[in-house]
Image (tube, rainbow, N blue to C red):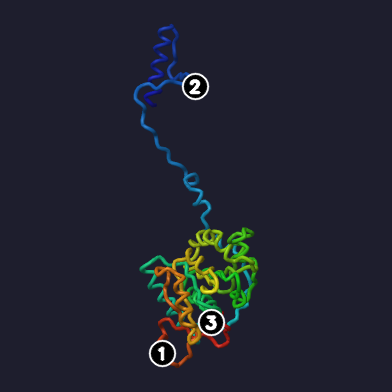
Amino acid sequence: MSRIHEALKRAEADRAAAQGVRVESGQIAEVSAMPAVGPKPPAIATVPSDSSARSTSQLNQLTHETLLLRCVPRNWSPDTKTMLFYDSEQGPGREEFRTLRSRLYQMREKQPLKKVLVTSSLPKEGKSFVAANLAQAMVRQQGRRVLLIDADLRAARLHRALGTVLTPGLSEYLLGEADEFGIMQRGAMENLFFVPAGRSSSNPAELVANGRLQVLLSRVESLFDWIIIDSPPAVPVSDAGLMANHCDGVLMVVRSSATPSDMARKARAEFDDKLLLGVVLNGIKRGGPEYDQYYGVYGIADEKAWAPR
């Protein structure tokens, strides 16, 4: 019993005695308001239950179970000539992607690295090819979950390589017409998730800059080991530079014997030094001097059947 309660009880007894009224032991007068008597007792800390202790952010936190329950399953029909890891673990280009994967893991030991933007200076250099196969190489490791995002709202391509639908996708999310699970797909390759570009927009740069992309990435980041984003080329439009602000690093794809050096330098200047992870040299001729020099480092010898973008 608190000291205030004891003091009130004594005061009531004294008052009753003075008035000739007997107060039975345990009788407590109901008081609607009372002055403080004596020193203020220390506050008693209460321990909330588990449910009340959870913050709003914790209650809204996405889980892997939520991802599997709400993500739309699709019957993908991938182009196995361009999606290299769907038909076999061995073959042209696969080892180079494994090497690229290893390089990224080595970088991750020295810096936060999960959200990787893949871009190029100009169209037709192979950035979509690199983004798609890097994502596949990542999920070949046991238990690794990867989200592949087609953020090229001007010339969407990845949905065709995966053999799936274009909409709903990123543009619908940026327009506020769908949530993250409404645009996310999963197919036959375990732990590979995909967000297509969605329907075309007349103002892609404005959509990218409206803040919703950052919301999407922050919402789903905890669900994945890697998020690979295929962006438009960096020189013709500003989209890649805007997207890079929400990523941990940028991979620049350069096509061997095709990309003009001045365009490559101009594209490189679009990104902060701290963001640029490295350059992927794409389209190397097998057996040539360039292949011997870059094999196992950054070189990717892509399939002839692939029409790079």
Label 3 neighbourhood size at 10 Å, few (<14), some (14-19), many (20+)? many
Marks 2/3: CA distance? 78 Å
Which quadrant, please, contains the C terminus? Answer: bottom right
The dot on residue 94 is none
Q: Is residue 222 above or below residue 10?
A: below
Mark closer to the chain start, 1 or 2: 2
Marks 1/3: CA distance? 21 Å
Q: Secondary structure at mark 1?
A: helix
Residue under numbered circle 3: 84
Q: Secondary structure at mark 2?
A: loop
Give, as a three-letter code, the residue at label 1. Answer: Asp
Give, as a three-letter code, the residue at label 2. Answer: Ser
Q: Kindly report which numbered mark, 1 or 2, lies closer to the viewer in this rendering.
A: 1
Which quadrant, please, contains the N terminus? Answer: top left
Cβ atoms at labels 1 and 2 below 8 Å apart: no
Q: Secondary structure at mark 3?
A: loop
Residue under numbered circle 2: 32
x, y (%) of residue 290?
A: 43, 89
Residue 46 lies in quadrant = top left
Q: Is residue 4 above or below residue 121?
A: above
Label 1 neighbourhood size at 10 Å, few (<14), some (14-19), many (20+)? few
Q: Residue at image x 40%, y 65%?
A: 112
Q: Is 153 or 149 nearer to us in this picture? A: 153
Q: Report the label total.
A: 3
Mark closer to the chain start, 2 or 3: 2
Residue under numbered circle 1: 292
Q: Kindly report which numbered mark, 1 or 3, lies closer to the viewer in this rendering.
A: 1
Mark closer to the chain start, 1 or 3: 3
Q: Is residue 177 left or right of residue 86?
A: right
Give, as a three-letter code, the residue at label 3. Answer: Leu
x, y (%) of residue 110?
A: 36, 68
x, y (%) of residue 71?
A: 59, 64
